Structures are given as structure tokens and as C-alpha cells.
Image (cartoon, rainbow, N blue to C red):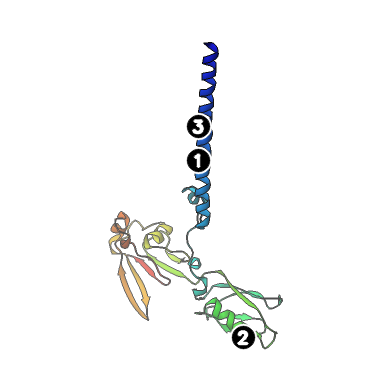
Amino acid sequence: MRQTRLMLGTRMGLIVLAFVVGSLAQNNAVEKKASAKANSDGTSAKSPSADVKSGARAPSVLDGDPLLYRIGVEDELGISVWHEPDISTNAVVRPDGMITLPLLNDLKVTGMTTKELQDLLTEKLKEFLKEPQVTIIVRQIKSRKVYLLGEVVRPGTYQLNNPKTVLQLLAEAGGPGAYAKVGSIYVIRQHNGSQTRLPFHYKKAMSGNKASDDITLQPGDMVVVP
């Protein structure tokens, strides 16, 4: 009897062990299949919180197509000519929209894309070099600005290198002052040579009920807090 019980117990143990091994193999196969599918889709099998932990930065104006960016006053440009270190340089766009380069002297660059400037320099340098290869990089963007006036803690000029709303600008400036008329804030926007006055509803924007209550700023906007 004792020997029979021992044999039964051994058989049950083997059955349980086989079940566990089979389950582990099945789970491993499912994980491999999911990983293969993720790789074929061009994605990685990471957890949803991975992007949060990585500390993703705010989008920049150059995060779209950098070839579409128009050079402006005070922008810093990196100009590299292959195998020509004496010509390669960094240049800051002057208030007159010009930069000064070796061999080429003064050139007007405001309003141009980096590709347009690259093509222009390549063509002009052909007078001095055989098959010049030019690369243009916008190292710093300082031409995109907005202006904050009136009853705020820190009025002044602010860079607009990233998407920014009126509320975000006010927060960056320390908020409205103690005597600010928050119900009368407005934005002055230049468009095709004319000015447009956009009323800003501070309390509605603060409530956050509708994203449209907060105005997304554009370069050259002037926010006035009476």
C-alpha cells in the first residue's frame, strides 16, 4: 500500500511539473511573438511609462522640418565649408539682416532658409574654390520673440523657440501684478502690415475648460496687461 501511494505521488508530481513547464514555454512564446511584432512595426516593446521616465523635452521650432525655418535677426549660424577651415565660421545675423563672411564680405540672409543660403554660398564660392561643399546650421534662434508689457512681475522681451501660450508667458514672467486688470488683457498681432487686437480672457483660460481660451503666441506678438 505504501509503495502504491509513493508511486501515485510521484506520478502527480510529474504531471504538475509538466504543466508548469508547458505554461512557461507558452508564455515565453507569446512574449517572443509580441516582441517580433513590435520590431516589425518599427516600435519597441517598452512600458507606457518609459517615455515619461526618459524626461522628454518640449518640442522646438526646429522639430518640424528645419529646412522650412526662415533665418532672422540675431540668429547664430554655423557655416562649414568642407576642407576649408579658414572660411568656415560662426556668424550672428546683424540688425540690418546681414552677415560677414571671408571672401564674400556682407550678405543679406534674413528671410532665407538654410537650404537657400547654402545654395547661395555654394554658388558664390565657386569663384574661389573648386566644387565647394557648404553646410549651414542654425546654432541659436534669437529672432523669434514676443513682448510682454504692463502690470506683470517681469515685463520685457521673451524668446519663442518653443510653442508657448499667453498663460505660459505670464507664468514665465511671474504672473500679473497686484493691480493688473486681468479682464482686459489683449494681444497685438502684426499680420500683412496691419495690427490685429486679440482679447484674452484670463479667467476662462485659467479654468482650463477649453483649450481655445488660451492664445498660442506667434513671433512678434505683444501681450499687454493693463
Residue 55 visible from this viewpoint: no
* Quadrant position of residue 105: bottom right
Q: Element under label 2?
A: helix
- Residue 165 drawn above or below residue 207: below
What kind of residue is marked 1?
Answer: Asn
Q: Helix, strand, or loop for circle 3? A: helix
Q: Earlier in the sequence, mark 2 or mark 3?
A: 3
**Residue count near mark 1 (Cα–Cα under 10 Å), binned few <14, some 14–19, many ≥20:** few
Quickly name the residue at label 2.
Answer: 123
* Camera sees residue 26: yes
Observer-side mark, 1 or 3, equals 3
Q: Secondary structure at mark 1?
A: helix
Query: Which residue is pictured at 58% across the width and 84% down the height?
Result: 120
Query: Is 182 left, or right, of 69 in this rendering?
Result: left
- Which residue was labeled with disc 1? 27
For disc 3, the neighbor class at 10 Å (few under 14, some 14 to 19, many from 20) is: few
Amino acid type at circle 3 is Phe
Residue position for label 3: 19
